[in-house]
Amino acid sequence: MFGETTGGVRVLLRVEGLCVLIAALWAYSRFGMGWGIFALFFFAPDISFAGYLAGPRMGATTYNTAHSYIGAVTSLVLGLAFSSHVLLVAGILWSAHIGFDRALGYGLKYWDGFGFTHLGRIGRARRIPRDLAQS
């Protein structure tokens, strides 16, 4: 097993991602820099996909770094601590993106490949029989 989450816990984690997305959209409406900026930078964390050009381990590492709440929350805290509107907005956008991905079922990646996530298998990895995926 790849440590994937299943059943009600998986649904709960996806709903949690949706809640983060909604909260971030609300925060952006209050503190943002306009919806054009939002549209321009919303998918910026997906640049981390480029890590997969160096193989699945590097890809998972870069993807997980860009899709963990650690960086987003750090940006929010620093934005508040130093009264930096840019860092605050970056943290809000970053959180919105992560929440969006989690709501869609895109979880943090395992080194086995892009399709193996903590929220379950996605894409081609879904077609691999569970007993083969666990070996």
Image (tube, grey):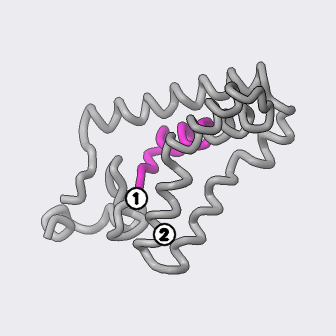
- Determine the residue located farthest toward the front in the rendered image: 82
Q: Is residue 19 left or right of residue 133?
A: right
Q: Are marks 1 and 2 in contact (CB under 8 Å)?
A: yes
Residue 96 lies in the magenta-colored region: yes
Front-lying residue, 107 or 64: 64
Instruction: Please tell me whether the stretch drawn in magenta is mainly helix, strand or loop.
Output: helix
Highlighted range, magenta: 95-109
Q: Residue reaching furthest bottom?
A: 54
Task: Look at label 2 and name its amino acid.
Answer: Gly
Q: Is residue 101 left or right of residue 34?
A: left
Percent x, y of residue 17: 48, 34
Mark 1 → mark 2, Cα distance in angstroms: 9 Å
Out of 91 and 28, give the one closest to the viewer. Answer: 91
Magenta span has 4? no
Marking on residue 109: 1
**Total residue callouts:** 2
- The answer to whether residue 77 is left or right of residue 120 is right
Residue drawn at x 48%, y 69% is 59
Classify 126 as above or below 98.
below
Does 57 appear above or below 102? Answer: below
Give the percent coordinates (x, y) of residue 6. 25, 43
Q: Which mark is residue 59?
A: 2
Looking at the image, is 69 positioned above or below residue 58? above
Q: Residue at x 78, y 39 (%)?
A: 38
Classed neighbour count for the residue bearing mark 1: other residues with Cα under 10 Å, few (<14), some (14–19), many (≥20): many
Q: Amino acid at mark 1?
A: Lys
Quadrant in the picture for the C terminus: bottom left
Q: Residue at x 35, y 47 (%)?
A: 119
Which quarter of the rendering shows the N terminus?
bottom left
> Can you tell which mark lies on residue 124?
none
